[in-house]
Amino acid sequence: MNSQSYSIAQQIYADLGIDTEAALQKMAATPISLQCWQGDDVGGFEHPDVGLSGGGIQATGNYPGKARTLEQLRADIDQALSLIPGKQRLNLHACYADLDGKKVERNEYSTAQFQSWIDWSGERGLGLDFNPTYFSHPLAESGFTLSNADAGVRGYWVEHGIACRKIAAEMGRQLGKTCVTNFWIPDGSKDVPADRKAPRLRLEESLDRIFAEPIDPAHNLDAVESKLFGIGSESYVVGSHEFYLGYAVKNQKLVCLDAGHFHPTESIADKISSTLQFAPELLLHVSRGVRWDSDHVVILDDPTRSIMEELVRGDFLGRAHIGLDFFDASINRIAAWTIGMRSAQKALLIALLEPYAKLQSVEAAGDFTSRLALLEQAKALPWGLVWSEYCRRNNVPDDAGALAGIKTYEKTVLSQRA
């Protein structure tokens, strides 16, 4: 795209009172956290005798080229980041610990198992986010972790959570970028339980123990994430939306809203303003739910656009932390990262370019006819030209060029991982 094309778009937006340069500056100041687990199908690199068990986590597909070592995963992340404009963050799960061939129990993890990630991220100017891993472990096979009736099992997972908060705080301290630590557990029942109350009482007690030690919020922020149902927890989830919303408001923790963790007809965009009225900050996991799967690759669809629109309209970007959460093994995994991230970024840019001041004005005047007309007019505005300019300024290819880069990497690198 040449500069003349951007200038034309700039003028079209200016006629609506929109400053495209200000929008691009906000884009640059709003990083999105790239999830490491797309690169190896949520496998992690723990000791080989720890298989995928418990938690209902399942990536479908067997596209060739999956990362099988930390080195391969990091090389793949580098390739994806080279195709994504702007400076982003990286979201790690604890099961991606660098164990150097040793067996270390999750409740004994320390910064030592993640120092190589901290160093690697620091070299790239990336902030890190973190997640305790409450699945893919023998002590998660029952389907209950922090709400487990067995005090010993429950204690193990409490210790894991405590360890992860300390690791995250050190990540934040060393990198100088606050780390968001997100707690999601798979606890629930396949069939209807007789007692819904007791597991939730145990979960509250476990969370209280995990969060007992104060941590400098400049280094670490805690978030709790709900889910409507999962594989093996179709009838009952201990950590429901209502449970975590109440817990977060009571204890002033971040609420994590995952776009794939609610009823298909629910809009998490509609939950943002009401949640932030009472909770201090918000963590958003941008995903795409399709029927019973919560983690399809993000695309530029209406739900994703609505999320970004609500963040911009409510001036919530300063109180929201945005990350991706999906895993697709049926397509090129680097393409999944790249397409998903660029789609989320496009949705954010479109929201930043919306003629919101005009929309507010006509809505306040009760002119709902003009409101509808403006909303429809905005859909045809030349945001694509502004997106191309953002890519150009960040020295990354346009959409066609990004796909070409993915195909080249597949041919030269991924195809060698037979």
Image (cartoon, rainbow, N blue to C red):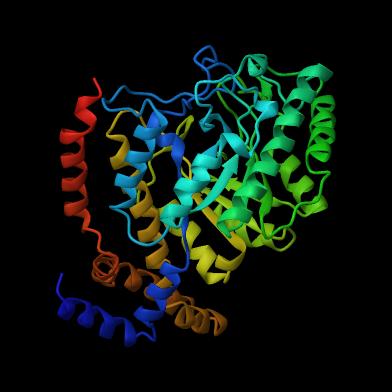
Q: Is residue 413 above or below residue 347?
A: above
Q: Is residue 54 visible?
A: yes
Front one among 325 and 407: 407
Left or right placement of residue 205 versus residue 408 in this view = right
Q: Position of residue 95 (x, y in %)?
A: 55, 29
Quarter occupied by residue 113: top right
Residue placed at 75% from the left, 60% from the top?
278
Residue placed at 69% from the left, 43% from the top?
165
Front one among 103 and 414: 103
Q: Position of residue 99 (x, y in %)?
A: 53, 27
Quarter occupied by residue 9: bottom left
Q: Position of residue 35 (x, y in %)?
A: 46, 42
Front one among 364 and 205: 205
Q: Is residue 321 above or below residue 188?
A: below
Left or right placement of residue 286 versus residue 172 in this view = left
Q: Is residue 9 above or below residue 240?
A: below
